[in-house]
Amino acid sequence: MLRIGLTGGIGAGKSTVSAAFAECGGIIVDGDVIAREVVEPGTEGLAALVDAFGHDILLPSGALNRPALAAKAFVDDEQRAKLNGIVHPLVARRREEIIAAVSEDAVVVEDIPLLVETGMAPMFPLVVVVHADEETRVERLIKRGMDEADARARIKAQAPEEQRVAIADVLLDNSGTPGELVERAREVWYQRVLPLAHNIRTRQMVRTPPKVVPYNPAWPDDARRIISRLKMACGPKALRVDHIGSTAVPGMAAKDVIDIQVTVESLAVADELADSLTAVGYPRVDDITRDRVHSDDPSVWRKRFHGAADPGRPAHVHLRVNGWPNQQFALFFVDWLKANPAVREDYLAVKRTALTAADYVEAKEPWFLDAYWRAKAWADATGWQPSEPDSG
């Protein structure tokens, strides 16, 4: 089963995308629907809300008076946190009950309005965010019958748009027509969601032909999203998780593949993480078991290698043992490149030459063997120490 996250600010058009995904065959688990379900008359959720906010949030029929609750719950952060503390756990429990009943080959779209606020984004191999600017959203909400002040208060109560953009693997712009949004959603479904589901199910990574492209300012953000997923999947078994390789060097041209290193206590621990990493979109690749640059003891250059299943964001995940030469090299190599412009130019020239070789990786190895000792000498001479890893 593939579970993807779908979110967007109120009035952004998330429901349109959800409906399009449903037409494509997705199983929709709608957070708004569940949130209403868990506070229906007779539920523990409604009883808890009454205890917290008073009986005047009820209609004469005994059902929840939503405008009355909103008038109390959205006045400040403390009251909103009280509301979320009651509803969110109930919604999460009901969501898991629904998903447990879904077939294993399904694609489940979890429509979660507060995906940022709940911190759930790293649980999903793919997060789709529907975006529209605030004035457009306010205009839409007013057309639905909402008062402008209430519309702006609802928008303000949610996470800022930049926080939603930060978790987006796919950002769907809904500044155009509903039809345009539906077409874009269908394109994402068939070109990204279904291939991702297939690759996770069959444990295949995305393999890309060697091609050096100009530096992409989006690479650090892509790496942070991957790091967040890997940390969620590995838990305390990951001693540190770092963005490594050429894409971690600002301004440097590179292959459009994000390299991430997960540092673990042993290769046995790396093996224990195989299924967890596959579940978040990074299946293990068993034909790559060690780094080619090695010393007289090749055993300390062994690793476990995983690759991204998402065709929209190729990535390599290297699990290496804490303190082993390959683990240290991956860290100080990036800092060496950052500190030495001439080395960056030399490495880039080697990569471009290697593009014409039969084996791109093998063609770079003579340079890497020499580079290891040069970089190590630099690290020793400068007293290099690993920096704090990206927080993800």
Image: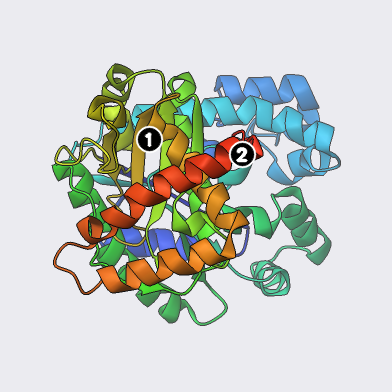
Kindly identify the amino acid type of the residue bearing the numbered disc 1: Asn
- What residue is rendered at 39% in x and 26% in y? 324
Query: For the residue carrying disc 2, how many other residues have a C-alpha within 10 Å: few (<14), some (14-19), or many (20+)?
Result: few
Q: Does any portion of residue 147 appear in the rendered image?
A: yes
Above or below for 186 versus 112: below
Let me know if residue 100 appears in the view.
no
In the shown orientation, is residue 128 left or right of residue 290? right
Q: Residue at x 13, y 67 (%)?
A: 358
Labels 2 and 1: the sequence-earlier one: 1
- Quadrant of the frame with the C terminus: top right
Q: Determine which residue is flagged by label 2.
A: 381
In the depicted structure, whether residue 384 falls above or below residue 50: below
Place of residue 315 in the rendered image (x, y in percent of width and height, measured from the top left): 35, 52
**Of residues 62 and 88, the one drawn nearer to the viewer in this rendering:** 88
Instruction: Note whether 357 is above or below 268 in the view shown.
Output: below
**Residue at 30% in and 26% down:** 300
Q: Nearer the viewer, residue 47 or 21?
A: 21
Q: Position of residue 272 (x, y in %)?
A: 28, 20
Colour scheme: rainbow
According to the picture, the residue beneath numbered tag 1 turns out to be 326
**Residue 152: x and y, percent?**
78, 60
